[in-house]
Image: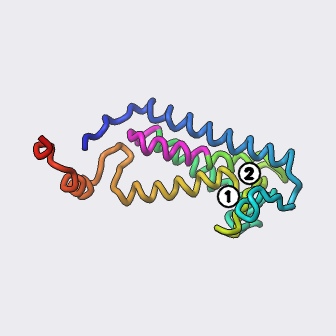
Amino acid sequence: MTDRPALRPAAAGTIAAVLAVLVLAADQLSKLAVIRTLPFETPVPILGDFLIFYYVRNSGAAFSLGEGVTWLFTIALSAVAVAIVWLLITRVRSRTWAIVLGLLLGGVLGNLGDRLFRSPGFAVGHVVDFISTPWMMPAIYNIADMFIVCCMIVVALLVLLGLHLDGTRDRKHADTEAMAAPDADEDR
């Protein structure tokens, strides 16, 4: 398996920035639509009990944990956003990492925007949540949350697979792939 050449810093940043803006736009536009059209705290079945829209404002984290310390989530989201941007500028040369971190940054910025600019006030705003899938989990979430969770799963997998931010692999993973790949001479 041949590896692609490493991305230039500008290319990695551009990929990540475009994806982050797309996720942020999808998240904020969906929240705007929810605020304008859905009744507050009233279930609206979309696909029976499979998918329900239920507009709430969450001052806490997942499952409304930490409702009294909203400002801590603002600080944490800000720190995560800064860390992702720093990694993108200084370390990321892999297309895969640029994509994953760009999508993750978009999700983080979506919820950070709520914390900073929604009521009840700056840095203590409540996140707009509206997606309920009771068959899967008892949480109510939003598009930003979906990207955050999915991207963190992918980050964990990339780390476990030994793919570094610069696109190189751990030696043990490269050896395993080389042994699994068929020899090019045998195919002739």
**Left of 184 or right of it: where is 28?**
right
| Apparent side of residue 160 relative to residue 136 in the rendered image (left or right) | left
Spot occupied by residue 186 in the image (x, y as percentages of width and height): 11, 46
Give the number of the disc on residue 73: 1
* Magenta span dominant secondary structure: helix
Q: Crowdedness of circle 2 by 10 Å Cα count: few (<14), some, many (20+)?
A: many
| Secondary element at tag 2 | helix
Contact, CB < 8 Å: mark 2 with mark 1? yes
Image position of 141 (left or right of 148): right
Residue type at mark 2: give it.
Arg
Residue 90 inside the magenta-drawn segment: yes
Residue 124 in view: no
Quadrant where the image shows the N terminus? top left
Q: Is residue 31 magenta?
A: no
Mark 2 and mark 1 lie on one chain; the one further toward the N terminus is: 1
Q: Is residue 136 above or below residue 173?
A: below
Res 15 seen here: yes
Which quadrant would the C terminus be assigned to in this image?
A: top left
- Name of the residue lying farthest toward the right: 39
Q: Quadrant of residue 23?
A: top right
In this orientation, which residue lies closer to the viewer: 166 or 35? 35
Few, some or many residues within 10 Å of mark 1 (<14, 14–19, 20+): many
Q: Position of residue 31 (x, y in %)?
A: 76, 47
Horizontal and vertical percent position of residue 52: 76, 60
Task: Name the residue beneath numbered marker 2.
Answer: 115
The residue sitting at 71% across, 68% down in the picture is 134
Left or right of residue 150: residue 130 = right
Judging depth in this view, the residue of 113 and 16 nearest the camera is: 16
